[in-house]
Image (spheres, coloured by chain):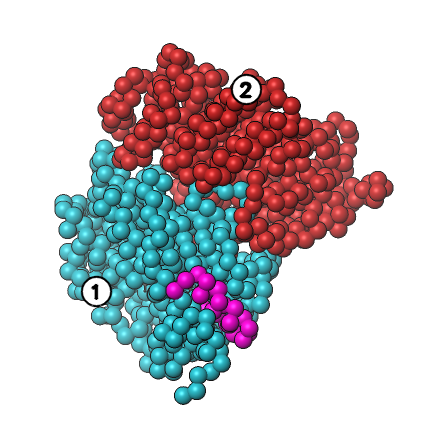
Chain colours: A cyan, B red
Amino acid sequence: MQVPPLVQELIQATNEEAVLWRPEDLMLYEYDALSSRRPPEAVVFPATTQQVAAVVKVAARHHCPVIPRGAGTGLSGGAVALEGGVVVSLARMNQILEIDLENQRARVQPGVVNQDLSLAVADAGYYYAPDPSSQKACTLGGNVAENSGGPHTLAYGVTTNHVLGLEVVLPDGCVIRTGARYWDRPGYDLTGFIVGSEGTLGIVTEIVVRLMRLPEAVKTLLAIYDSVADATATVAAITAHGITPAALEMMDGLMLRAIEAATHAGYPLDAAAVLLIELEGLREAVEEEADSITAVCGAHRARQVRVARRAEERELLWRGRKNAFGAIGRLTPSFYVQDGVIPRTRLPQMLDYIAGVERRYGLRIGNVFHAGDGNLHPLIMFDSRDAQQVRHAVKAAEEIMGKCVELGGSITGEHGVGIEKNELMPLIFSEEDLAVMRKLKQVFNPQNLLNPGKVLPSGKMCGEVRVQVSLGS
Amino acid sequence: MATATQAGVAKLASIVGEARVLTDAASCQACAVHGRVPRCVVFAPSAGQAAQVLQCAAEQDLAVIPRRNGTKIETGNPPRRYDVALSLKEMNQVWYYEPDDLVISVEAGMKWGDLQHFLSRRGLWVPLDPPGGDKASVGGCAAAGASGPLRLRYGTLRDMVLGMTMATTEGKVVKTGGRVVKNVAGYDLAKLLIGSWGTLGVITEVTLKLFPRPPQTRTYAAAVASLEEARQLRRRLLESPLAPQRMVLLDSTTARLAGAALFGDERFQVWIEAAGSERVLRRYDAELSGWLPKAHSLGVNESNWASLADYPALWLGAWRGAAVLKASLPVAATETFIGQAEEEARASEARLACIGMTAVGVVRLALAASLPPDRLASLIERLRTQAVQLGGSLIVERCPADVREHVDAWGPPGDDLQMMRRMKQAWDPKGILSPGRFVGGI
Ligand SMILES: Cc1cc2nc3c(=O)[nH]c(=O)nc-3n(C[C@H](O)[C@H](O)[C@H](O)COP(=O)(O)OP(=O)(O)OC[C@H]3O[C@@H](n4cnc5c(N)ncnc54)[C@H](O)[C@@H]3O)c2cc1C
C-alpha cells in the first residue's frame, strides 16, 4: 500500500514507529467511551513537545484537522475524529518530570495516568486530589481538557483548582507556557481558560499540578435507606448543615444490585438507596463530623449507618462505586449516561422526576452519582437493536437535561460538552454568550483545525439525529 | 477634541440619565488614577446600562476605567488615556440567594463588608479577607484576583466563583458558568476576568460558593527569632495534619501597627489562626504548644487580622510615601526572599516591613526611604529580579507617582504575552478599557 504524502510528512516529523495509518490500525481510534464515528487519516504518538509542534505544523500545511487524545475514556465524544484528520495521542508522553514536595507541586507530561501520579507520591504522604472514577486509565491531559471531577472533588475542587501552569502547543505549532509553579502570576489566567476547553484551544504537553498532603484520618460511612427520597433529602440536609464531606455519593437500589453482583463490595441488596460518605482531616474533626452526619442520616430515616472499620473494607466500598459503569453491563446491552447538575436542594424533586421519566418510557434508569455537588449520572438502559427504545432513550435524556436546566442547573458537570451536548448549549447560554465564546476560541484556534465540531453548537444537526449518531452502538 | 468629548458625555447621559453623569471638578478629581483625571464620572445602575455605556464609549473612543471604592485602583501602570470613570456604586443588589445550597449571586458593586454582614445572619461567609477590607467590592476583588491570608485554607476567588456576568465593549451582557457548584459547560470566561484588572470587560454580577462560618477561632502568636526558624515552622506546619485558616509571618513593626503587643525584642512574629470546635482547638493547643514554646494569644483577635487585611492603609498610615509590593513565589523560597529583601533595603538605607503568607507563597512588603524616586525604583527592580530568580514575580501595588515613572507595575511578561494581547484585542478591539494599565502595556 502506497504511503500517502500526509503520512510521509508525519513520519518525518516523528518516526516510523510513531505513526499508524493502515485502515486496520486506525479502527481502534474511531471511538471514545461515548461514541464511534469514522476513522482518522492517521494516528501519531509524539514523544516530545517538539514532535507535537512538528506534527501540528504538518497537519496545518495539509489543512487537516488535529484531534488530541489521551486514553479515550471521554464520555462526550471529545477525542473522536468527527471530520477525519490526524489524531495526536499523548499516551507515550507519560513521564512524571518532577516532584517537588516542599512546594507541593509536580510537573508531568499529559499522558501520565491519573492514578499513577498519586501512587508516585503516596509513600511520601501526598496525593493528587481529583480522582475521576476512570482514574486507573484516564490521563492527566484528558483531565485538564475536560476539567474532570471525581468523588473527592466535593471538598477539594475539580481539576482546574489543582492546575497552576501548562505548556501548550497552539494550532499553528507555536509553543507557549501559561501560568507558573506558583499562583497569582500577573497576566490573564490563560491556564484557567484552557483547562476545560476540551482540546479545542491547544494541545497540552506539560502540566504543573498541586499535590496535597494525605489526611491524618479518614472515615467512610455507608448510610442505607428504604426510600430514595430519604436519601436525597439527607444530601440536601448535610449541605444545609454546612458539612462538606470529602465525598458524598449516592447509588440507587438498581445500581446497588448490579454493582454487588459484579464487585461483591458488601452493599445491601434490599436497599432503595445508599449514600457513600467519606470524611477526611484532623482526627477530632472527622469524629465530630461523623457524629453529626450520622445524626442527620438518622433524622432522615436511614435504616442503618455503617462505618468501615478497616482500610480493606473502605477500599471495597469504593471499588464498587468506581466500577459502577462497568457493572451495568449485567443489566442492559446499551446505556446512555447523563451528566446534568442541579442545585443540591432540588435533588429529591429531580430524582422523583427521573423516576417519572423511567415510567413514561418503560426504560430502566439507574442512578449512581456525585450527590454532594448535585452532579447526576442517570444511566438510561436500552437495547440499541430496538429503534423504538433508542428513540425513547434519547427523548428521556433530553427531558432529564431540560429538567436540570429548569431547576437552575447545567447540562454537564464533568464529562464535557464534546459532540454530545454542543447542540444543547443554547439551553443555558444565549446567542450573545455563545458569540463571545466563539470569538475567544478563534483567538487560539483561528482556522478551526484543532478538534473541530466540539463544544460550540454547529447548528448543523437537529437534536435527535445528533444523539442517535453519538449513541452509535 | 473637547467638544467631541462633550458630545460623548451627552450620549452617556442619554443612557443612564443626566443625574448619573457628573462632570464637576471635585467628582472627577475624586476618581483620578495616578494623577490622570477623567472628564466625567458615570454611575451605571444596571448591567445592561453598563454595557451600553461601554459600547457608547467605544464608539466615541473614550477611555473607561471601571471602579467602586478605589481600594485597589492604584495598582497598575498609569492609564495611557482616561475619559470616563464608570462607577458600579449603584449596583449592590443580591440577585439570588439560596443559603441551604450555599450559593449567592450579587451585583459587582456590593461592598465586601455588606456581603459578609448579609451572610452572617445565616452563619455563612465567603472565606476571603481581601485587601481593602470591608470597603472593597465584590467586582473589584474579582477583577484584582484579590485575596488575603485566608487563602491558606480556602483558596481564592478563582476557586469560589461559580458564575459571572460581564458587560463587554460591544455593548453585550454576557454570562459564564452558572449557579451550581460543578459545571463544565462552555469556556470558562470567569477565569479570564478574575485578575484582568478591568482591561477585558466590566464584571457586573458574581455568583459565589458559600461556606459555614467556623464555630470558633483561636489565634496563636509567637516570637520568631530568625528567618531560618520561620522556615522550619512553615515546613513543620505544611507537613503536619493541621490545617489552620491563616498563617502570617510579620516583622515586629507590622505586628505593632496591627495592634499586637511584642514578646520582647523579636524580629518577627508568627500568627496562626485555627478554626473549629472546642475539641479541634484543643488539639491545636496541644500541638502548637510543642512547636511554639512561648506561644500565647497576645490577645490577637479578629480586629488585628482585619487591620492586617487592610495592610496598605496600615503601612501608608505610618510611612507616608512608602511603596507597597507583592511578591508571589514558590512556597519554599518565601523566607529566602524576605531575607534578600531585608539586605537590599539595609544596603539602601530603606525601611522594610513585611507580611509573609509563607505557607501560600505570597509576601507583601512596604518600602520606605528618603531616596530620590529613581533610586527607590531601582531598589524595587532589584527586589523584583530576586523574586524572578527565585522562580516568582513581584508587582507594585502602591507607590508615589514619581517612582512609578521609573518602574513597571507588573514586571517582565512571559512567552504567552502574544496570546494575552490577542485576548485583549478580542474583548476590547478599540482599546478603551483601562488602556496601558496592565501587563506588557495592555
Ligand atoms: C468508567 C468511566 C468513569 C468515568 N468517571 C469519571 C468521573 O468520575 N469524573 C469525570 O470527570 N470523568 C469521568 N469519566 C470521563 C473521562 O474518564 C474523563 O473525561 C477523562 O478526563 C478523559 O481522559 P482521557 O485521557 O481518556 O481523555 P480522552 O477521552 O482521550 O480525551 C478527552 C478530551 O480531551 C482532549 N485531550 C486529551 N488529551 C489532551 C491534551 N494533552 N491536550 C489537549 N486536549 C487533550 C481530547 O481531544 C478530548 O476532547 C469516566 C469515564 C469512564 C469511561
Residue for point 58% across, 68% down: A447
Q: Which residue is mark 2?
A: B349
* Disc assigned to residue A258: 1
Which amino acid, by three-letter code, is at mark 2? Answer: Glu
Q: Label 1 sits on what residue type?
A: Ala
Identify the residue at image location x=39%, y=20%. Answer: B269
Residue A88 lies, with reference to residue A270, above or below; the image says: below
Element type at mark 2: loop
Q: Are marks 2 and 1 in contact (CB under 8 Å)?
A: no
The kind of secondary structure the magenta stretch mainly shows is helix
Label 2: chain letter? B
* Left or right: where A359 falls relative to B380: left
Percent coordinates x, y for residue B70 in the rendering: 62, 31
Cα distance in 3D space between marks 2 and 1: 74 Å
Identify the mark at residue B91; answer none if there is no mark: none
The one nearer the camera, B153 or A313, is B153
Q: Examine the structure image and report whether residue A55 is included in the region drawn in magenta.
A: yes
Quadrant of res A7? bottom left
**What are the residue bounds of the magenta stretch?**
A47-67
